[in-house]
C-alpha cells in the first residue's frame, strides 16, 4: 500500500487535520509532499503513535530535476539529517518498507 499525504497545511504548518493515528499504523509506504516546514512534527507524530523510528526514510529534494538530492536515514532521525544537510523545499518524504529496497545514490 502507498499513501500520499500533504506535509504542510495551507499556512505552511503541520497538517493537524490528517488522521495521524491511521498514518502511524499503515502497513505500507507513506509519501509526504512538501514536508520540509513540518518535518519535525511529522516524524514526531508518526513515531509517538507507534511507527518505528528505525524505519527507513528518504527525503528527495528537487525530485526529478537538475539538482535532485536524496538524503537517506531512519524516520526517527531524518529531520535532523535534513537540517544538517541544509535540505530545502521542494521535497518529498518517503518512509516505509519500499524505502528499504531503494537504491540511493
Image: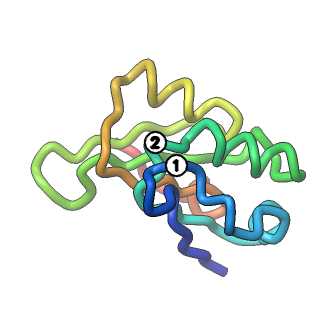
Residue 83 sits above or below residue 3 on the image: above
Q: Position of residue 99 (x, y in %)?
A: 56, 56
Front residue of 101/1: it is 1
Q: Residue furthest left?
A: 66
Identify the residue at horizontal 45%, vertical 24% (top origin). 83
Q: Is residue 21 left or right of residue 81?
A: right
Identify the residue at horizontal 76%, vertical 70% (top origin). 19
Write down the residue under mark 1: 13
Tally of numbered discs:
2
Q: Is residue 35 left or right of residue 24?
A: left
Quadrant (top left/top right/bottom left/bottom right) for the N terminus = bottom right
Q: Secondary structure at mark 1?
A: loop
Q: Residue furthest top?
A: 84
Lower position in the chain sequence, tag 1 or tag 2: 1
Quadrant (top left/top right/bottom left/bottom right) for the C terminus = top left
Identify the residue at horizontal 65%, vertical 42% (top origin). 41
Q: Position of residue 31 (x, y in %)?
A: 53, 65
Q: Residues within 10 Å of mark 2 (few under 14, many from 20)?
A: some
**Image quarter for residue 23?**
bottom right
Mark seen at residue 37: 2
Q: Residue furthest bottom?
A: 1
Q: Secondary structure at mark 2?
A: helix
Q: Position of residue 26 (x, y in %)?
A: 78, 71
Disc 1, disc 2: CB below 8 Å? yes
Residue 45 sits above or below residue 88 on the image: below
Identify the residue at horizontal 60%, vertical 59% (top origin). 15
Q: Nearer the viewer, mark 1 or mark 2?
A: 1
Residue 63 sits above or below residue 25 on the image: above
Mark seen at residue 60: none
Amino acid at each position: 500500500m502507498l499513501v500520499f499525504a500533504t506535509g504542510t497545511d495551507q499556512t505552511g504548518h503541520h497538517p493537524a487535520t490528517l488522521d495521524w493515528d491511521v498514518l502511524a499504523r499503515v502497513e505500507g509506504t507513506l509519501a509526504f509532499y512538501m514536508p520540509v516546514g513540518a518535518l519535525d512534527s511529522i516524524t514526531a507524530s508518526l513515531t509517538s503513535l507507534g511507527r518505528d523510528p528505525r524505519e527507513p526514510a528518504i527525503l528527495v529534494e528537487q525530485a526529478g530535476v537538475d539538482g535532485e538530492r536524496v538524503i537517506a536515514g531512519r524516520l526517527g532521525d531524518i529531520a535532523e539529517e535534513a537540517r544538517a544537510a541544509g535540505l530545502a523545499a521542494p521535497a518529498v518524504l518517503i518512509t516505509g518498507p519500499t524505502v528499504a529496497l531503494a537504491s540511493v545514490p
